[in-house]
């Protein structure tokens, strides 16, 4: 897979950050090429005491450009370097799309640059 040529990109803004002793939940929204407006909830759980790496799980709802609603569970991993998170995950969109997705999150500027790579499209 050529990660220099995504099938689509987007930018999501952080709407809220909810820390807890065992995880951090971040809510995002923003436009993504080929889909429309995404509304995403991601929960991060650290795998180490440093809290610099771990797992992510979440859910995405998307209002497509034609007005239809699709959704996807999200499962992946992350690592943190200071104010930046790098997130890798796959999604299984309810319209039959399967994507490998990367997010570059800046916690201070409250934004995420999104790139996705189409793995498969299945008729549903």
Image (cartoon, grey):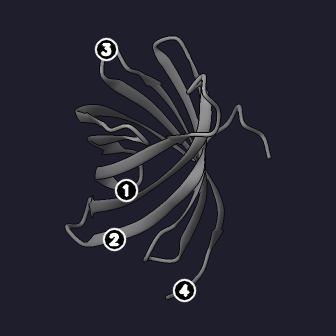
Q: How many marks?
A: 4
The residue located at (52%, 25%) in the rendering is 85
Q: CA distance from mark 4 to mark 1?
A: 16 Å
Residue 60: give x, y in percent of width and height: 36, 59
Q: Name the residue beneath numbered marker 3.
A: 109
Query: Closer to the N terminus: mark 1 or mark 2?
Result: 1
Q: CA distance from mark 2 to mark 4?
A: 14 Å
Return the mark for residue 70. Answer: 2
Task: Out of 120 and 43, give the one closest to the viewer.
Answer: 43
Query: Closer to the N terminus: mark 3 or mark 4?
Result: 3
Q: Residues within 10 Å of mark 1 (few under 14, many from 20)?
A: some
Q: Name the residue beneath numbered marker 1.
A: 35
Secondary structure state at the residue bearing disc 3:
loop
The residue located at (34%, 25%) in the rendering is 111
Report whether residue 78 is seen. Answer: no
Q: Are marks 3 and 4 in contact (CB under 8 Å)?
A: no
Query: Closer to the N terminus: mark 2 or mark 4?
Result: 2
Task: Out of 95 and 42, give the one closest to the viewer.
Answer: 42
Q: CA distance from mark 1 to mark 3?
A: 24 Å
Q: CA distance from mark 3 to mark 2?
A: 28 Å
Residue 114 vs 58, above or below: the answer is above
Residue 95: give x, y in percent of width and height: 44, 76
Q: CA distance from mark 3 to mark 4?
A: 38 Å
Q: Nearer the viewer, mark 2 or mark 4?
A: 2
Q: Are marks 1 and 2 in contact (CB under 8 Å)?
A: yes
Residue at the outermost bottom position: 124
Q: Nearer the viewer, mark 3 or mark 4?
A: 3
Q: Name the residue beneath numbered marker 4.
A: 123
């Amino acid at each position: 897979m050529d990660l220099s040529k995504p099938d689509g990109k987007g930018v999501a803004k952080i709407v809220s950050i909810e820390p807890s002793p065992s995880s951090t939940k971040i809510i995002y929204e923003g436009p993504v090429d080929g889909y429309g407006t995404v509304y995403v909830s991601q929960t991060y759980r650290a795998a180490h005491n440093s809290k610099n790496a771990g797992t992510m799980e979440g859910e995405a709802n998307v209002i497509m450009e034609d007005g239809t609603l699709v959704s996807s569970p999200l499962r992946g991993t992350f690592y943190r370097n200071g104010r930046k998170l790098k997130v890798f995950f796959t999604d299984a969109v309810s319209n039959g799309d399967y994507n490998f997705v990367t997010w570059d999150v800046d916690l201070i500027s409250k934004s995420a640059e999104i790139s996705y790579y189409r793995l498969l499209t299945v008729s549903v």
